[in-house]
Amino acid sequence: MTRTIAITRGVSPGMARCELTHLARAPIDLELAAAQHRAYEQALRGLGCEVVSLAADPDLPDSVFVEDAALVFDDIAVVTRPGAVSRRPETEALAPVLAQYRRVSFIAPPGTLDGGDVLRVGRRVFVGISGRSNESGIEQLGAIMWPYGYTVSGVPVRGCLHLKSAVTEVGPSTLVMNRAWVDAGLFRPATIIDVDPAEPHAANGLLVGGALIYPASFPRTQERLERAGVRVVTVDVSELQKAEGAVTCCCLIVAQPPGEGDPR
Ligand code: CIR
């Protein structure tokens, strides 16, 4: 049976010093953040994931957001070079863990790439051209991925941190999207579910184990998703949201088909 491994990392005791781009700094309750993160890990387990949790690092305020430091495809893992200088050392702890599951490639200078900017839809990989990911990073990813049959294309985003702040996959070729932040036409022929206008940040959900892990704070968009047949599992991530985090960003999903050394 295919195992689904979710790599996470504990909430940094230094999270109050996190990067912020679009939000004003608000006090973060660290204990509550850690409890919410544990509940998130529990939701992953409930959907069949084995959680591999890396130790928190007090010197890396944003390291709970592991998604930005690496990409995991069926064929290969890519260690990124995060756009925020403060986040670059986050990759060091992740690379050896990923190497247990995949061949690993690296984004090199002058490229920058945040995993939050990378959305895979089948064999198409969309990368946000954002404050964090640049043309060189996108070109390098294209060169890494084409031998595996993926096309990689840059997508302008506006008004938000990452591409996956604006759009994520909620089912086969089905996307939830805030059209104010990204051009919907680029994703044709995918089906699009629009966020409720009162919930601009509601376009980030994590599809895993046949369900969507989704913030509890967007009930109107949640209703739209459920009406469209999406099975939603809500988590309260209020403290992580104060650090401009969401739900995709707190794990890396590794689908591990049965192989040598695995019980069948
Ligand atoms: C940052 O600005 O890098 C962090 N404070 C938040 C990163 C969230 N990452 C994501 O949504 N992929």
Image: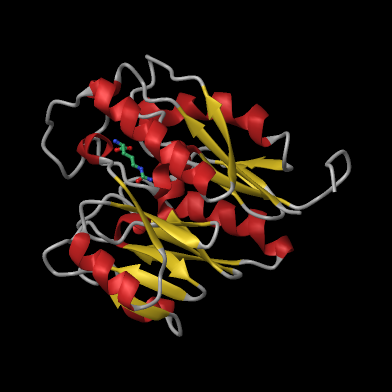
Q: In this picture, is 11 found above or below 65?
A: above
Q: Position of residue 136 (x, y in %)?
A: 49, 51
Residue situated furthest front in the rendering: 46
The N terminus, quarter of image? bottom right
Q: Nearer the viewer, residue 256 or 157?
A: 256
Q: Position of residue 116 (x, y in %)?
A: 41, 49
Q: Which residue does the image show at 36% across and 26% down from the upper left?
A: 86
Q: Residue at x 73, y 62 (%)?
A: 147
Visible residue check, residue 108: no
Q: Does residue 203 sit above or below 249 in this rendering?
A: below
Q: Is residue 261 rendered to the left or right of residue 4?
A: right
Query: Percent position (x, y) of residue 15?
Result: 29, 23
- The one nearer the camera, 194 or 70, is 194
As drawn, is 183 to the left or to the right of 251? Answer: left
Residue 115 left/right relative to 36: right
| Total numbered badges shown on the rendered structure | 0
Residue 70 position by quadrant: top right
Q: Residue furthest bottom?
A: 189
Residue at left offset 37%, top offset 25%:
11
Q: Position of residue 57 (x, y in %)?
A: 43, 17
Give the quarter of the image for residue 163. bottom left
Q: Is residue 215 above or below residue 250?
A: below
Give ligand 1's quarter of the image.
top left
